[in-house]
Image (cartoon, rainbow, N blue to C red):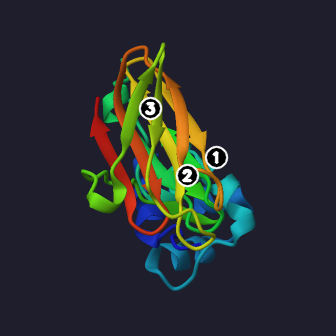
Amino acid sequence: MDRYVTGDVIRRLRESKKLTQEELAGKLHVTSKAVSKWETGRGYPDVSLLEPLANALDISVIELLSGSPIENRNISANMARGKFYVCPICGNAIRAAGEAVISCCGITLPALESEEPDEEHLILRQVTEDEYYVTMAHPMTKEHYISFFAAASDMGVQFIKLYPEGPAEARFKIDRVRHLYAYCNRHGLFRVRV
């Protein structure tokens, strides 16, 4: 894993729950010396203790690993503020309606920053009845390809997963689409406003 719970996080969360090291140790069936070692950075909790530790601190394992609570401050999700995440190991593509802690294949994924397309990544669209036909003149080799197209509206996101050696094309229902996205496995995420 690229991130692991730190002693400072354990101490801060323990203190916010008004627990002593002895009380936390009792909940986890470990010694208070073990908790002290974690908090001072001289040791780490075993991976088998992450879930019980998170439960003892009344947070999720993801919150424990990230070091901060996840709060839903976005009462009405705005799809335009959504974030894309792509796993560099398996290629899994994930869309979240806002800020999130996303992990895949044992690593925490950073949110992708979209860019305006350059000449090599122009996103072309044609209207055919009630759909956008989206294409790119882009290599689709096993080493360099467009991984997905997406169309975001205020109601949701349409995803089309693409594969190497296949065509770089997709069809999306036009209804309220605001942005079109394309993800190149080498150059990142590109976005055009519709």
- In this picture, is 73 found above or below 165? above
Q: For the residue carrying disc 2, how many other residues have a C-alpha within 10 Å: few (<14), some (14-19), or many (20+)?
A: many
Where does residue 151 sit, x and y in percent of width and height? Answer: 44, 32
> CA–CA distance between discs 1 and 3?
38 Å
Tag 3 secondary structure: strand
Q: Amino acid at mark 2?
A: Ile
Disc 1 or disc 2, which is closer to the eye?
A: 2
For the question of whether residue 151 can be seen, the reply is yes
Q: Amino acid at mark 1?
A: Asn
Lower position in the chain sequence, tag 1 or tag 3: 1
Residue in the image at 31% along x and 54% along y = 113
Q: For the residue carrying disc 1, how many other residues have a C-alpha within 10 Å: few (<14), some (14-19), or many (20+)?
A: some
Residue in the image at 38% along x and 54% along y = 189
Say the numbered circle drawn on residue 62. Answer: 2
Where does residue 132 sit, x and y in percent of width and height? Answer: 45, 26
> CA–CA distance between discs 3 and 2?
28 Å
Q: For the residue carrying disc 3, how many other residues have a C-alpha within 10 Å: few (<14), some (14-19), or many (20+)?
A: many
Return the residue at label 1: 55
83 or 151: nearer the viewer = 151
Say the numbered circle drawn on residue 151. Answer: 3
59 or 107: nearer the viewer = 107
Q: Quadrant of residue 161?
A: top right
Q: Amino acid at mark 3?
A: Ala
